[in-house]
């Protein structure tokens, strides 16, 4: 009997302890602190003057916050909260019951506009308009997807705080992160902001009330997601122009220390994850082109130091706005909805302090972005002037041999310039952008002179080196291309990895220059070499761990298809070769591109294939529409249009006036393949104008070089 009691008591104790342990393990909370007008300038101050241990223990990354429309606190928040680029709607705000809009109670407005209003939720009278507006865009941001997914998985959501300026100027966008598909989420807004006559707009965040409310919410729910809209920075910068400089500095430091103290208090909990996200940097940082926002993450495990890595960007310390929703869901082990393109951030424990490395990397990105337009506009103008000048040399009946040599040096310098943009990418860290540009120009000219003086086939050598360097860079993960003026930019956010359209054109034309030694080869040998080259190009451009450029991959396949049809027995039977070239080759290209995505890590191309294969034809049409819109926008406003138009016009004039300058059949094959490649890049890329400009420029420069050599031969 005694043994039985012992067994029963033991089982009860075991049951109690295991039950408590289970509930303890399951209890978890995420506090998302939304801080509008917080930028990397504030990060610099906090890292230097703040609590070193607090910031050292946080994972830090630069966040691309680019929305579908223009940059703004609202547009950016819609994008961050939906995991897809979105836009806001006029008059959007969150309200508490009893508040008024233009003298009318919010509850009455909801009844009049929708026929109902929630009893236990914040009120969002413009929610249905926000949904409608985003459904009309090509991105179709799913409003409320984060809050709805959390609600379905039993996570309690709550919103605290505002960025209000006064009772008339309400700014309450934090609830966008937590609303469900009906636009509902509980919360307390105005109670979390206290009156302080000395603070900007007489308002400041009530730290004590926030802490008490957070603890109460967590105590009453096993899993909670709490959004805190910390509006003190927003109010400070809204008031700045009316403040004296000294008083602003004092308030600036006070606001930073207040935020730091709040974070110190809420981080100290082993079941609580904490994120700080800035949807929009302040106006001064925006004007300085510092258009990436800080993102901090404190893991509940309290690692010594965290490194955040995004599969979306595949760059260290740079993440995308589409990653925030998946990362939040991953904390609760919730499956990410298939419609979302982002991935959860990988959190890597580190023993070393990464903050200096991160800040230096981000400042490098800012410097490239702030000087890119000046450098590229100067570069493009020089290329255009050079092409026109060499064209005049060619069309003159008699030209001094010295001028012909100068023309050839300039052409070789121009053709070699893309490789210098790779080699000199880190030089920008140490010199002014103006010195950088002229150094690059002088090195290009020097290389052109050396190639002309000491090599027999300078174009072949130059194409080979350029092709090999880009190939090696792709194999290494594009470290040079990521920070090149001719590469892609994390702030623009159109591409984060692989090969951009600027270098896609350069890469393909450089590869075709390798065919020059095969001018005198037989038709069979030439076709075999071309096929090997294009197989390699297609793999390098399309593989998920290399180029991942769909437009360039398809262009390479179509260019090969052109050669294949041209060398086949059906060339004279247009009823056979035309359908093959227009339908068969593109379909085969798509199949190859899909197969190249099956191995390796997820990419934007793989995501697109997944959506299309699941029958989402709307997504496919939206992508096509965006690509056409982007090309038209680039054509109207980009500096690349100058080079694009000039190169294509000069190529047309050259083909018209120099009809018999190509005498060798293989030369004609190479030139025609180059032209097909350039046109395909134009039609198949979302920034096809850029790819077509760089590729056609190289084609014209190469053709000019051949013509100058021919003219030199005639003169001698």
Image (cartoon, rainbow, N blue to C red):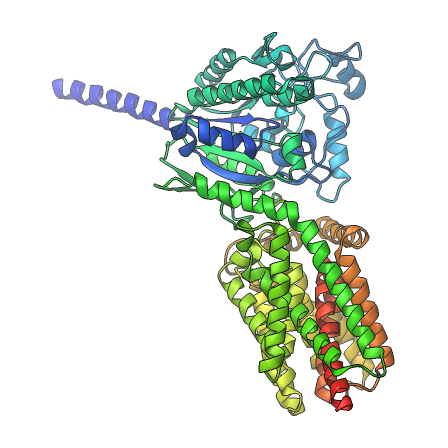
Q: In this view, does 56 lie to the left or right of 245?
A: left
Q: Position of residue 396 (x, y in %)?
A: 85, 79
Which part of the image, by quadrant, shows the C terminus?
Answer: bottom right
Q: Nearer the viewer, residue 652 or 221?
A: 652
Q: Which of 101 and 220 is in front in this view?
A: 101
Above or below for 656 versus 253: below
Q: Which of 51 and 3 is in front in this view?
A: 51
Q: Nearer the viewer, residue 273 or 169?
A: 169
Q: Is residue 148 left or right of residue 688?
A: left
> In which quarter of the view is residue 565 placed?
bottom right
Residue at 35% from the left image edge and 27% from the top image edge: 22
Q: Is residue 140 left or right of residue 249?
A: right
Residue at 65% from the left image edge and 25% from the top image edge: 173
Residue at 60% from the left image edge and 30% from the top image edge: 148
Q: Position of residue 354 (x, y in %)?
A: 42, 41
Q: Position of residue 485 (x, y in %)?
A: 63, 55
User: From this viewpoint, is residue 450 visible?
Assistant: yes
Which part of the image, by quadrant, shows the N terminus?
Answer: top left
Residue at 75% from the left image edge and 67% from the top image edge: 386
Q: Where is residue 535 in the image (x, y as percent from the top left)?
A: 59, 74
Q: Is residue 165 left or right of residue 22?
A: right
């Amino acid at each position: 009997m005694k043994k039985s009691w012992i067994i029963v008591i033991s089982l009860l104790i075991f049951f109690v302890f295991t039950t408590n342990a289970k509930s303890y393990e399951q209890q978890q909370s995420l506090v998302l602190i939304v801080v509008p007008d917080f930028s990397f300038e504030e990060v610099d101050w906090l890292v230097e003057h703040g609590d070193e241990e607090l910031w050292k223990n946080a994972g830090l990354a630069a966040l691309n916050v680019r929305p579908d429309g223009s940059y703004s606190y609202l547009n950016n928040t819609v994008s961050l909260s939906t995991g897809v680029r979105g836009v806001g709607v006029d008059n959007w705000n969150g309200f508490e019951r009893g508040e008024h809009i233009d003298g009318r109670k919010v509850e009455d407005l909801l009844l009049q506009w929708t026929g109902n209003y929630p009893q236990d939720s914040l009120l969002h009278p413009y929610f249905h308009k926000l949904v409608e507006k985003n459904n009309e865009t090509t991105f179709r941001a799913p409003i409320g997807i984060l809050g709805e997914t959390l609600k379905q998985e039993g996570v309690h959501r709550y919103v605290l705080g505002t960025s209000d300026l006064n009772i008339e100027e309400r700014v309450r966008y934090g609830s966008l992160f937590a609303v469900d598909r009906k636009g509902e989420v509980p919360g307390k807004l105005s109670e979390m902001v206290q009156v302080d006559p000395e603070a900007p707009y007489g308002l400041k965040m009530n730290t004590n009330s926030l802490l008490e409310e957070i603890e109460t919410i967590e105590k009453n729910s096993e899993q909670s997601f709490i959004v805190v809209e910390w509006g003190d920075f927003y109010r400070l910068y809204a008031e700045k122009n009316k403040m004296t400089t000294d008083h602003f500095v004092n308030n600036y430091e006070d606001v930073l220390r207040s935020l730091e103290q709040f974070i110190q208090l809420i981080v100290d909990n082993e079941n609580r994850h904490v994120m700080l996200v800035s949807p929009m940097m302040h106006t001064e940082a925006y004007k300085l082109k510092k258009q990436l926002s800080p993102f901090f993450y404190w893991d509940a495990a309290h690692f010594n130091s965290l490194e955040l890595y995004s599969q979306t960007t595949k760059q260290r310390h740079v993440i995308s706005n589409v990653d925030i929703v998946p990362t939040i869901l991953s904390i609760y082990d919730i499956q990410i909805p298939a419609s979302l393109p982002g991935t959860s951030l990988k959190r890597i424990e580190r023993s070393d302090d990464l903050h200096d490395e991160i800040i230096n990397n981000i400042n490098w990105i800012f410097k490239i972005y702030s000087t890119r337009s000046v450098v590229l506009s100067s570069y493009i103008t020089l290329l255009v002037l050079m092409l026109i000048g060499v064209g005049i040399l060619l069309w003159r009946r008699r030209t001094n041999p010295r001028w012909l040599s100068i023309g050839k040096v300039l052409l070789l310098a121009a053709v070699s310039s893309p490789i210098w943009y790779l080699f000199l990418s880190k030089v920008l860290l140490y010199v002014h952008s103006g010195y950088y540009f002229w150094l690059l120009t002088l090195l290009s000219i020097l290389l052109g002179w050396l190639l002309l003086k000491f090599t027999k086939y300078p174009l072949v050598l130059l194409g080979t080196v350029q092709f090999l360097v880009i190939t090696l860079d792709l194999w290494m993960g594009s470290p040079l291309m990521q920070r090149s003026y001719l590469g892609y930019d994390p702030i623009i956010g159109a591409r984060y990895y692989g090969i951009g359209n600027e270098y896609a054109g350069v890469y393909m034309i450089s590869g075709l220059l390798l065919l020059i030694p095969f001018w005198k080869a037989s038709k069979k040998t030439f076709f075999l070499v071309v096929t090997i080259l294009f197989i390699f190009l297609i793999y390098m451009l399309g593989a998920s761990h290399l180029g991942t450029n769909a437009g360039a991959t398809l262009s390479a396949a179509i260019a090969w298809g052109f050669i294949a049809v041209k060398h086949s027995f059906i060339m004279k039977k247009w009823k056979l070769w035309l359908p093959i070239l227009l339908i068969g080759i593109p379909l085969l290209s798509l199949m190859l591109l899909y197969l190249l995505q099956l191995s390796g890590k997820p990419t934007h191309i793989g995501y697109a294939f997944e959506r299309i294969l699941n029958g989402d034809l709307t997504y496919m049409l939206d992508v096509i529409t965006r690509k056409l819109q982007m090309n038209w926008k680039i054509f109207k406003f980009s500096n690349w249009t100058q080079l694009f138009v000039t190169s294509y016009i000069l190529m047309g004039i050259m083909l018209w006036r120099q009809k018999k300058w190509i005498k060798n059949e293989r030369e004609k094959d190479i030139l025609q393949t180059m032209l097909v490649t350039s046109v395909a890049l134009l039609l198949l890329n979302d920034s096809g104008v850029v790819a077509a400009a760089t590729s056609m420029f190289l084609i014209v420069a190469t053709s000019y070089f051949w013509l100058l050599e021919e003219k030199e031969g005639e003169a001698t």
